[in-house]
Image (spheres, coloured by chain):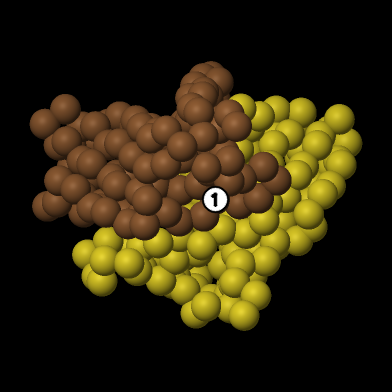
Amino acid sequence: GESVGLHLPTLSVQEGDNSIINCAYSNSASDYFIWYKQESGKGPQFIIDIRSNMDKRQGQRVTVLLNKTVKHLSLQIAATQPGDSAVYFCAENKKEYGNKLVFGAGTILRVKS
Amino acid sequence: NAGVTQTPKFRVLKTGQSMTLLCAQDMNHEYMYWYRQDPGMGLRLIHYSVGEGTTAKGEVPDGYNVSRLKKQNFLLGLESAAPSQTSVYFCASSYSGPGRRFKDTEAFFGQGTRLTVV
């Protein structure tokens, strides 16, 4: 049957502060991860990705950190802006689904002005 | 370049009715996916396809069927809608899976279809 899901956690930050959004993944065999941003009423949009042979990858104002030992992924957003308010999802390449991306539950980021 | 287009954008069904959601992509992507997103929750993979003529089950396939007769289209069918299928449905496509070029796994999403079953 259908599993019962959890409601999304919320992270509230002050404009200009740095944000850290965390994600735990389940499959130690997953070798590719992506962070997506979903604004209200829209589909998810790609932010940044990382392969399992890397620990860190930086983009414009965003950094993704991967800790394979504890199966943990984080997204750091520098100088958070109101436009960063959205739901953020991590996605992992799950081999049991034929190397397909499967999404985590997501985190709501609210930026206070 | 339209990217990924979903139709319809909104739909209300009565319990037991059937319908088909259409997803079309113009990026020549091999992989296509259907997800559902329930209020305040994450995306769950329903079915996916790795190429024309192929489909496979995801995390929550029960109550849904899919077809990929043409590379650019991925159809999601509900044969007998139930209130538990009230959700927002997202289609996505990607060039390939991991193992090839790094960015080819990036999935591009449609705008979503809001389905209510009463």
Q: Where is residue B34 in the image (x, y as percent from the top left)?
A: 56, 52
Q: How crowded is mark 1: few (under 14 residues within 10 Å), some or many (20 or more)?
A: many
Task: Tell me how many marks there are.
Answer: 1
In screen coordinates, is A6 left or right of B113?
left
In screen coordinates, is B32 left or right of A82?
left
In the picture, which quadrant includes the C terminus of chain B? Answer: top right
Kind of residue at badge 1: Pro
Q: Quadrant of residue A68?
A: top left
Residue shown at 67%/66% (left/top)?
B5
Q: In which quarter of the image is residue A110?
A: top right
Instruction: Kindly tell me whether residue A1 is visible in this rendering.
Output: no
Q: What element carries label 1?
A: loop
Q: Position of residue B44 (x, y in %)?
A: 51, 39
In screen coordinates, is B115 left or right of A74?
right
Instruction: Kindly tell me whether residue B93 is visible in this rendering.
Output: yes
Depth check: give the residue in front, B103 or B96. B103
Q: The brown chain is which one?
A: A
Q: Position of residue A37 (x, y in %)?
A: 50, 47
Depth check: give the residue in front, B44 or B54. B44
Chain under callout 1: A
Residue designated by label 1: A44
Instruction: Classify B45 as above or below B86.
Output: below
Depth check: give the residue in front, B18 or B8. B8
Depth check: give the residue in front, B90 or A61. A61
Residue shown at 30%/29% (left/top)?
A24
Q: Which chain is yellow?
A: B
Instruction: Classify A74 as above or below A58.
Output: above
Residue shown at 81%/34% (left/top)?
B117
Residue shown at 80%/37% (left/top)?
B116
Q: Where is residue A54 in the image (x, y as percent from the top left)?
A: 14, 51
In the picture, which quadrant includes the N terminus of chain B? Answer: bottom right
